[in-house]
Image: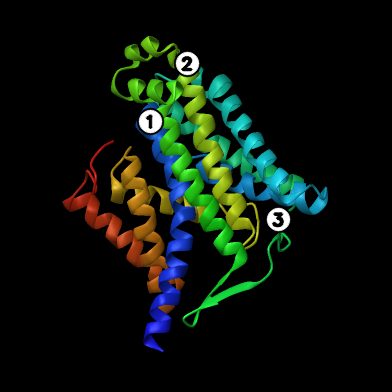
Amino acid sequence: METTFFLQTLINGIQIGFLYVLMALGLTLIFGIMHVINFTHGQMYMLGGFFLWWLFEIHHINYILALLLTVIIVAAIGFIVERFLLRPIRDQELFVMCMTIALGQFFEFGARTVWGPLDKAIPTVMPGIIKFAGVAITNERLMAVVVGIALVIGLYLYIHRTKAGLAMRAVEQDPEVATTYGMGIDRTYALVFSLGSLLAAASGALMGTIIVVNPVMGTAPMLKSFMIIILGGMGSIPGAIAGGLIIGLMDSFFSSLFGIDIAYIFVFAVAFMFIIFKPRGLFGRG
């Protein structure tokens, strides 16, 4: 029984961890390159869940197409936010922070007005359960893990193998160098914010098929994303991946053993310990 419990909890932790990774990658990408703490990130996650529900459940669009449209729509929203609201005040960090906080509230209350305050359930896409060695995982959770891994690999290849990705890395080190890769700083920042929003939306859409969708669903994942990048290292992509999996496993084991509330306390306690004793995180600043 103990072995089965351990394996089941481990599988659950890895599954939820990869969705945390997607969320944290978007946040750390924006911070690492733009040096912006994006407080709208949780609402981009929430919009991902709502748009998938709206397209798939209400308009009966094919699930894969609905998922693609969802991340494209939220990425476009991210582009608009960066281009018209953040760029004019980019050099004033306090104003940028206040703007992202205000936008987060705008999106949350907007979702409540348009879609209502009640929970929405995305219909099952891949019914069925896979069992092995006494451990069970639903097809939907397995699909979420596969898509999450694919997006993480895709992000890595994009950043390290493409011209735009090289421009992003150049901006992180020295904004002036970005021009040598044929991409201006403004376009790089717009792309980074759009990509970060896309990753948050993908995480919210995939999580929405497992739990429920509501206007405040992004609050807890955003807080955990901050804990993840503190644990892994602010601006570090490897740190976001490692931190997401660690927090996912902690969530799974502590929730199973002690309950959700105690799990939250442990996660925040670990983050506080890192802030005090290892402020650069596991991988340092990316």
Three-letter residue code for mark 2? Asp
The amino acid at mark 3 is: Pro
Residue 244 versus residue 220: which sits nearer the camera? 244
Q: Toward the viewer: 17 or 94?
A: 17
| Three-letter code for the amino acid on which mark 1 is drawn | His
| Structural distance between the alpha carbons of marks 2 and 1 | 20 Å
Q: Is residue 190 visible?
A: yes
Res. 117 mark: 3
Residue 37 visible at all? no
* Residue occupied by mark 2: 186
Residue 213, image quadrant? bottom right
Between the residue at mark 2 and the residue at mark 3, the CA separation in whole angstroms equals 37 Å
Q: Residue at x 72, y 45 (%)?
A: 66
Q: What element carries label 3?
A: loop
Mark 3 → mark 1, Cα distance in angstroms: 41 Å
Dot 1: few (<14), some (14–19), or many (≥20) neighbours within 10 Å? some
Residue at 63 percent of width and 57 percent of height: 208
Relative to 163, say whether 203 is above or below.
Answer: below
Q: Residue 160 carries which label?
A: 1
Q: In which quarter of the image is the N terminus?
A: bottom left
Number of on-image labels = 3
Residue 231, image x and y in percent?
Answer: 29, 51
Q: Which of marks 2 and 3 is in front?
A: 2
